[in-house]
Amino acid sequence: MKSDGQAMTSTTKPKPKPKKQKSVAKLREEAAVLLQKLVRMKAADENGFATCVTCGKRQHYTEMDGGHFISRGWKATKLVEENVHPQCKGCNKYAYGKHDDYALYMVDTYGIEMVRELNDKKRELCKQNRIELEEIKLELRARIREQEIRLNLR
Ligand SMILES: [Zn+2]
């Protein structure tokens, strides 16, 4: 260190760090966050209110969660749109997702066969690579933009 108070100057610019590639897990997580937002927006009425699928409470979509029926810990079903629905935080966070009520909602909405298939699918090997996950993210972003237009947020 110089002690004469002069700023240290350097003629060589620091090399830009090579952009670190995001891991597949990170990309999947980012896609899941987008999907959770999309399902809340899709379910919202023109005033932005949606219904919690497990208790029926009406809330603004920005205050709700996108709750997974099959736990988001299962990779193969983490990005399946039919596996994610708006839930109030009371149900999703503080009542363990109200799994019993969620199961009834799923069967009522999609039928038992589809729910079984979804439940089987969770054990499938999840083969999505970086490129596929980037594409999924782009598509989800585009659909969120459509919802923003519909909800007059743009
Ligand atoms: Zn609820």
Image (cartoon, rainbow, N blue to C red):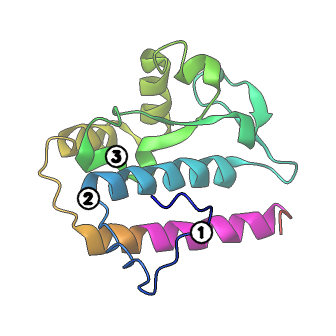
Residue type indicated by callout 2: Val
Mark with earlier residue (1, 3): 1
To which residue does mark 2 refer? 24
Mark 3 vs mark 2, foreground winner is: 2
Q: Is residue 110 left or right of residue 42?
A: left
User: Is 23 in the magenta?
Assistant: no
Mark with earlier residue (1, 2): 1
Residue 123 appears at what percent x and percent y?
14, 41
Q: Secondary structure at mark 2?
A: helix
Residue extending furthest top? Answer: 95
Q: Which residues are magenta?
A: 137-151
Relative vertical location of residue 83 with respect to residue 142 in this rendering, above or below: above
Residue type indicated by callout 3: Lys
Q: Secondary structure at mark 3?
A: helix
Quarter, ligand 1: top right
The quadrant of the picture occupied by the C terminus is bottom right
Q: Residue at x 78, y 70 (%)?
A: 149
Disc 1 C-beta below 8 A from ligand 1: no
Mark 1 vs mark 3, foreground winner is: 1
Relative vertical location of residue 66 with respect to residue 129 in this rendering, above or below: above
Front-most of residues 136 and 99: 136
To which residue does mark 3 refer? 78
Q: CA distance from mark 3 to mark 2?
A: 13 Å
Q: Residue at x 69, y 71 (%)?
A: 146
Instruction: Identify the mark at residue 7; answer none if there is no mark.
Output: 1
